[in-house]
Amino acid sequence: MSFGERISGSRPGIRTARGSGFAAVIVSVLVAGLAACGSGSGSGSQATAPTAPAKAGSTAPAAAAQAGSAAPAAAAGSGLTRDGTKLKFGQTARVGYSYGTGATTGPYQLTVTVRKGSISDLSSFDLDAQTKLGVPFYITEVVKNVGPADGNVSGWGGALTVENAAGDDLDSITLLGDFPTCQGNPPNILAPGKQFTECDVYIAPRGQSVASVTYQNYDNTTLDQTTVTWTP
């Protein structure tokens, strides 16, 4: 993760992280062969257990996201979607991205889609009691570099804020292991004409859902800001 982490609690394998406008609970997964294939970024060993098969009938997140409509009108002179634009899930914006204190790169085409899952989807993972009472939502971003140069897209997911109808941030969980239903991470560098898919799992309390997904980029070098929000 590119944002800061805060270690809390005494339960092994669970870390709580906050940063970039959303909270993340990192959950340890019991997946066979995790240490052998090198999935984890740490040097410690991981417990193992059988991996659950992919759900029948599930579709690749990228396919749904790429079905979005064309980008809306850009702000004059910037080439980016206007700050404050409201879109529907599946529509495409044209945004810039700045990693850390670096200058904004891009532009990038960004398509956001949301799918509701079932907590049983996560049965192979070691979830805490509170998470088990929630409902997972899969937030998928398809990002394409339509600019003239390579762009640093590390930590892209940290630019998202996911909220319920009351305007409260929803928690995300990072699953350490293979989860075909929702997976994909940004590369460090994205070349012109290339794209990547990122999918993140957010947990809403039972009876709640994802009411909005907001992307925000702030350029420390020019003080320019772009905020785009997607809703159902």
Image (cartoon, rainbow, N blue to C red):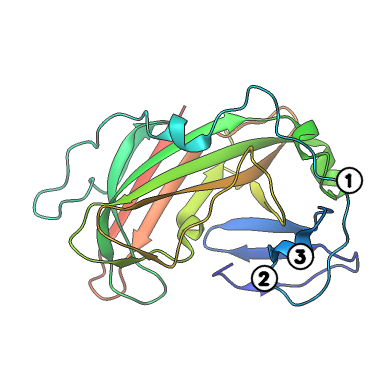
Residue drawn where x is 77% and y is 40% of the image: 122
Q: Is residue 100 above or below residue 95?
A: below
Under mark 1, the amino acid is Ala
Mark 1 secondary-structure assignment: helix
Where does label 2 land, which residue?
41
Q: Is residue 140 left or right of residue 104?
A: right
Give neighbour class at mark 1: few <14, some 14-19, many 20+ (Cα, 10 Å): few
The amino acid type of the residue labelled 2 equals Ser
Residue 190's image quarter?
Answer: bottom left
Residue marked by disc 3: 36
Q: Is residue 4 left or right of residue 84?
A: right
Vertical position of residue 10 compared to residue 137: above or below: below
Closer to the camera in the image, 187 or 77: 187
Q: Nearer the viewer, mark 1 or mark 2?
A: 2
Determine the residue positioned at 76% across, 65% down.
36
Query: What distance separates the C-alpha of mark 1 from that of mark 2?
Result: 26 Å
The percent coordinates of residue 88 (x first, y second) are 39, 29
x and y, in percent, of residue 12 in the image: 89, 66
Q: Which residue is mark 1?
A: 129
First-in-chain label (1 vs 3)? 3
Tell me how far mark 3 sits from mark 2, CA to CA.
12 Å
- How many tags in the picture? 3
**Lower sequence index among marks 3 and 2:** 3
Measured as percent of width and height from the top left, residue 162 is found at: 54, 45
Circle nearer the viewer, 1 or 3 = 3
Whole-percent x and y of residue 19? 57, 65
